[in-house]
Image (tube, helix red, strand yellow):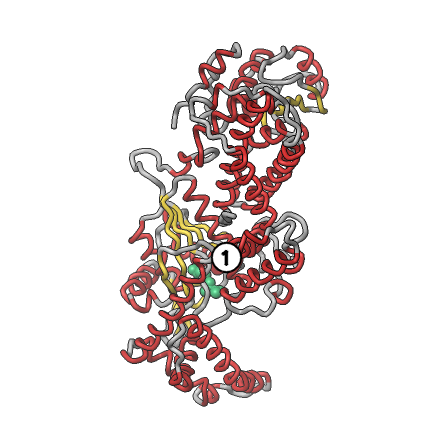
Amino acid sequence: TTSLPGLEAFVAEIGLGPVPFFAAADVFNNPLDIYHSYLAADFQQLVDSDPELVYKAIQPPNAIQDGDLDIVLPRLKLSGGNPKELAGELLRQIQPHVLFGFPFQDGIHIRFFFSPKIIPRLLLPYINDRKPSYGIDKTLGLRNGADSGRKKVLVEFSSPNVAQDFTSAHLRSTILGAFVANIHEAMGWDVVRINYLGDWGKHLGLLGLGWRKYGSAEKAEDRENLFKYIHNLYNKMEEELRPELEARKNARDAGQDAAILDTQGLFAERDVTFSRMEHGEEEAIALWRKLRDITVEYYVETYERLNISFDEYSGESDVSMNPEAVVEVETILKAKGIYEELDGAWVIDYDKYGTKLGTVTVRGRNGSTTYLLRDIATVFDRFKRHSFDKMIYVVCEQDVHFRQVFKAIELMGHPEIADKLEHITFAKANRRSSHLGDAQLLGDILDQREDFMREVMSASPDEYPVEWGDAVAKAMGLSSLVVQELRSRKGHSTNTDLSLLAVEGETGPDLLRCYARLCSAIATIGVRLTPEEVPSLDYEPLWMSPWCDLLRLMTRYPGIVKSAFNMVDPATILAYLFQIVEDLTSCLDEAEEDESGGEGSSVSSKYAARAVLYESVRQILESGMKMLGIAPAST
Ligand code: ARG
């Protein structure tokens, strides 16, 4: 949208000219920039610097207690005088402005608070007009220049391995990846969510072997149990293989040749089974497909509980099904002299190209593809199919691996593709013991949360009314997990005990409870205003604390979303939502207190103003929670 209905009339009404133009301002998405523009235009006349420079010297202070906008003196690059003294001098020359209260000096800063009488009248019609798109700058998702249209991003996340545990690293990737996809989607990007399953390699040989050995008694009735069954089967096979792996290690440690052991026992059977798959033997492939289908079916259902769905279930097997893609990659690697033969294997010596990524095997001695080769071939395949503007891998650790992938693409003569690739990494999550209990499957992790939340809820019916029911318990349980994962900035690991989650600090259930309380306050007032009525309301009931504090905070949402997007940091949004919860709770508390005592004629205008405020703040909460992947529970 490029208009703000009623804004012009309003600024004229309070004696202001049209919003001054600044290139850096985004008045159609961010109401704070309206204030910012007027302030910059006024201040520019005092200092006579470049207007855009003045604009950029102004920012909202980090802590909202410090004010709403802040002129940072050194950024004005004024000559002469020290910035503190200059701040004092300029402060004396600043004329009162209808949008702001009296400014004050804080060291090198001149700080401003919004005038409480203006905010509701400016902000609430603004949000009411934007509705769910308040704060969302859709231009961030547009291509520029001739190549117009929406930008496309591929987000690869979660990516568990067939039949193996769903680890805390996969959980992190799932929840963070969903956020990365959601926020791009909100910003107008065309998003493709990809799950790259670990569905190829020797572990599938081992699983296939186990299926043939023990799988005849398959319990095909219950799909979920079927997945659990292959997970158990795989663990059992690993258990059986362990002594052989140890024997090989012992032999090698003792300086003996362990090669003979490779040709014996389960070890050899596993390799044979996998090599049948690699050779595309019909029966082996049919079994592999069955095991993979069981896995995908299970995950589709289980991710649904987190409101996540993938557009593609791809996997490491893709390139084995499409050998030409690999041939193409290797042909280029050879032609460019990047590929070197070493003891029968094919390697890239990355150190030759100004990196410290070592010498890495790309195709193994026995002719099998490697993890690296599969990832390289997959990049080209995806680029061909999607011609993406960006591809983001949300994967725990594996930094070196992804640098090798990206560098290989560049060396192959495609720096323009390499530039579009991004790896979002995060520290390994803490040990599963405190974090996930003994759950080894995603479904079990989710069950555990829900059960836990049911207990908490039934133990405190005052806070969690019984009539909220089981759907709410589920939503609360899942929200606790999501918030726990996203609470720390993406580089840090979490270390929160399950038992602390529902009761301490800022939690998912807190958010949902506040949201539920807000919705019931909206329902209780029961006033629905038309878009024409919203600007002409009497907002005086919102001029005081705590109402005006909440309103000030609400002006920050667009800036918060933008910085969360730029830094790919969900914690920014989460921290903001908890501030909203805090301020909103003060408002709801106060509203409840004065509900009993009627105040004559002002009562109806008070409720109407609150109704508009509540609906606007609800929009913000809903928008923020959705980006984080928390579904507001309807109570
Ligand atoms: N399946 C892998 C694992 O569990 C993660 C895959 C990461 N993605 C990739 N394109 N290599 O560790």
Find disc 1 in the rendering and name its residue: 173
**Does the image show residue 76?**
no
x, y percent for residue 597? 66, 28
**Closest to the observer: 572 or 574?**
574
Q: Secondary structure at mark 1?
A: helix
**Closest to the observer: 468 or 51?**
468
Where residue 590 sits, quadrant-wise, is top right
x, y percent for residue 306? 47, 56
Image: 369 above or below 51: below
Three-letter amino acid code of the residue under disc 1 = Ser
Q: Residue at x 43, y 35 (%)?
A: 133
Q: For this view, does 176 lie left or right of residue 492?
A: left
**Does the image show residue 596?**
yes
Image: 429 above or below 463: below
**Closest to the observer: 323 or 572?**
572
Q: Residue at x 58, y 85 (%)?
A: 250
Mark 1 CB in 8 Å range of ligand 1?
Answer: yes
x, y percent for residue 372? 42, 64
